[in-house]
Image (cartoon, rainbow, N blue to C red):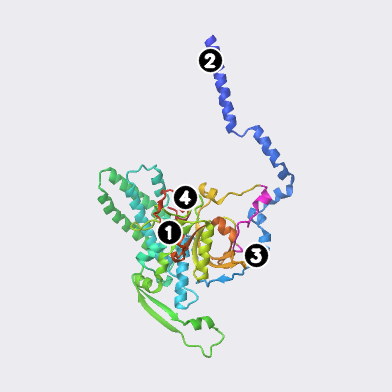
């Protein structure tokens, strides 16, 4: 009987301990009372609750004082080569890169606008990504499917994402063509279906390669089979994007600079008849004639606030199997702004990567860190440092655009930057955004700069042996969609 009594006592004690442990993890009544007490101040103002529950939070919290004092003046402003539209695709990196190239070509031709073909380079990007994916499957053939490496590789085998270096790699290998030589198709501007189909096919190929290896096939056998797999992807791309041109005729109207600068359509009495030039090119000869070689040598500067500055980092990502992966020099954001300013003062546009999801008043085309005053309306402080946002996967580059102007104080300090986007001319201010300097500080993560502008000190940092980062490093993840 005593044994039974002691057993009951022990069970009761253990149960009490278990309940006590559970109470510390659960929302209990004491917590609920504290929540209600803390919230009484907000609950007392029914007008705020009614406003928040019945209106868009962004429209309710927009900083009207900022909008009132906003202006569109820039004391340094480059000409745009024409607003482009990536439509329902994730090709911002390619559009932004080509917009920088377009500007130089337009200037070379003395034209207001010029546009390189995005679908031409997208075609080859997709082929190269398919090859890299299958090569990754072969390189990690011994890794378990549930390993962190394989989980990363399998996420986006055929995604739209990329980065400046991806575009440069493609142009150097395949050349480039004007948009007329390979225009957009229904599939190139709305990539969801083709990406899903190709992604599913590639994962099926991955399963096949791993089964072949498990059955004792050699790596050489796997690569031989890979060539047949890529042939199917090529066919899929041709059906959806068209056949990339091997040769094309480039026709344009010849204009001298004086004619472009002083052109007035109302004065026709002395107007010369137009002269049209026709040139036959391959993508490579077009590259050699119209694309400046220095553009292919620009470098990436990043603000990665949770890693040491003055160091180059290398990611295990790329869109060409035979090319080195992405490398970026990490510098404080003030340095990124300094080099961006130098480029603009030399009449050079700057491609940059940012987190576009915050502080964005799309209708007016304004980026400002304090655009929405959520804290004032909701009585909650939403301040999180840039470093913590990066570390905890709330902050990352997810969009690329081009800076073509800056407005400064009398002392030369930037106030706001003029940005050319690739969302068409119906969004923002006819396709342009006004990026305030505090937004640059918080949400810009990368700028692409001609390395000739680097100081000797930063050049030495750039030339250091890169520190390799793991395959799953998050910094470029949202932009590249690896």
Mark 4 / mark 1, whichever is N-terminal: 1
Task: Write the residue at 47% across / 75% down.
Answer: 107
Q: Which residues are magenta?
A: 363-379
Which one is closest to the eye, mark 1 or mark 3?
A: 1
Which one is closest to the eye, mark 3 or mark 2?
A: 3
Q: Is residue 199 magenta?
A: no
Q: CA distance from mark 1 to mark 2?
A: 73 Å
Pointers 1 and 3 in contact (CB under 8 A)?
Answer: no
Question: Can the viewer see residue 361?
Answer: no
Badge 1: residue crowd in 10 Å (few <14, some 14–19, many ≥20): few
Mark 3 / mark 2, whichever is N-terminal: 2
Mark 1 / mark 2, whichever is N-terminal: 2
Residue corresponding to mark 1:
460
Seen in the image, is 287 located left or right of residue 266?
Answer: left
Q: CA distance from mark 3 to mark 2?
A: 76 Å
Relative to 14, residue 395 above or below: below
Task: Write the residue at 66% across / 58% down.
Answer: 63
Question: Can the viewer see residue 452?
Answer: yes
Badge 4: residue crowd in 10 Å (few <14, some 14–19, many ≥20): some
Residue corresponding to mark 3:
70
């Amino acid at each position: 009987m005593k044994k039974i009594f002691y057993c009951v006592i022990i069970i009761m004690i253990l149960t009490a301990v278990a309940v006590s442990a559970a109470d510390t993890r659960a929302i209990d009544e004491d917590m609920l009372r504290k929540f209600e007490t803390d919230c009484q101040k907000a609950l007392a103002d029914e007008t705020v609750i009614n406003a928040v529950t019945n209106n868009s939070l962004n429209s309710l919290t927009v900083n009207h004082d900022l909008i009132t004092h906003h202006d569109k003046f820039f004391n340094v402003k480059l000409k745009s080569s024409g607003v482009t539209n990536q439509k329902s695709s994730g090709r911002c990196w390619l559009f932004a890169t080509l917009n920088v190239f377009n500007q130089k070509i337009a200037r070379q031709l003395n034209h207001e606008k010029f546009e390189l073909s995005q679908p031409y380079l997208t075609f080859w990007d997709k082929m190269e990504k398919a090859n890299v994916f299958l090569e990754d499957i072969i390189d990690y053939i011994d890794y378990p499917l549930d390993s962190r490496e394989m989980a990363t590789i399998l996420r986006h085998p055929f995604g739209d994402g990329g980065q400046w270096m991806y575009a440069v790699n493609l142009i150097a290998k395949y050349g480039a063509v004007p948009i007329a030589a390979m225009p957009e198709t229904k599939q190139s501007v709305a990539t969801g279906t083709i990406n899903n189909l190709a992604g599913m096919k590639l994962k099926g190929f991955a399963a096949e390669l791993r089964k072949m290896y498990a059955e004792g096939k050699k790596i050489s056998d796997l690569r031989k089979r890979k060539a047949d797999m890529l042939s199917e992807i090529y066919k899929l791309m041709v059906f959806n994007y068209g056949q990339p041109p091997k040769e094309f005729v480039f026709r344009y109207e010849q204009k001298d600079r004086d004619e472009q600068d002083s052109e007035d359509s109302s004065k026709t009495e002395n107007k010369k008849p137009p002269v049209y030039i026709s040139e036959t090119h391959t993508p490579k000869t077009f590259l050699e004639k119209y694309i400046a070689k220095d553009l292919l040598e620009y470098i990436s500067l990043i603000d990665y606030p949770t890693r040491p500055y003055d160091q180059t980092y290398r990611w295990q990502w790329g869109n060409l199997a035979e090319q080195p992966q992405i490398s970026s020099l990490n510098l404080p954001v003030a340095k990124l702004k300094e080099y961006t300013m130098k480029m603009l003062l030399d009449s050079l546009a700057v491609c940059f990567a940012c987190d576009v999801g915050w502080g964005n008043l799309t209708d007016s085309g304004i980026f400002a860190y304090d655009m929405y005053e959520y804290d004032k309306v909701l009585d909650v402080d939403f301040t999180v440092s840039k470093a913590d946002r990066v570390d905890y996967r709330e902050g990352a580059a997810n969009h690329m655009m081009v800076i073509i102007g800056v407005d400064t104080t009398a002392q030369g300090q930037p106030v706001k930057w003029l940005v050319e986007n690739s969302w068409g001319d119906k969004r923002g201010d006819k396709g342009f955004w006004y990026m305030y300097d505090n937004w640059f500080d918080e949400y810009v993560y990368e700028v692409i700069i001609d390395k000739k502008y680097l100081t000797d000190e930063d050049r030495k940092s750039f030339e250091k042996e890169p520190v390799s980062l793991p395959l799953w490093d998050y910094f470029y993840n949202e932009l590249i969609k690896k």
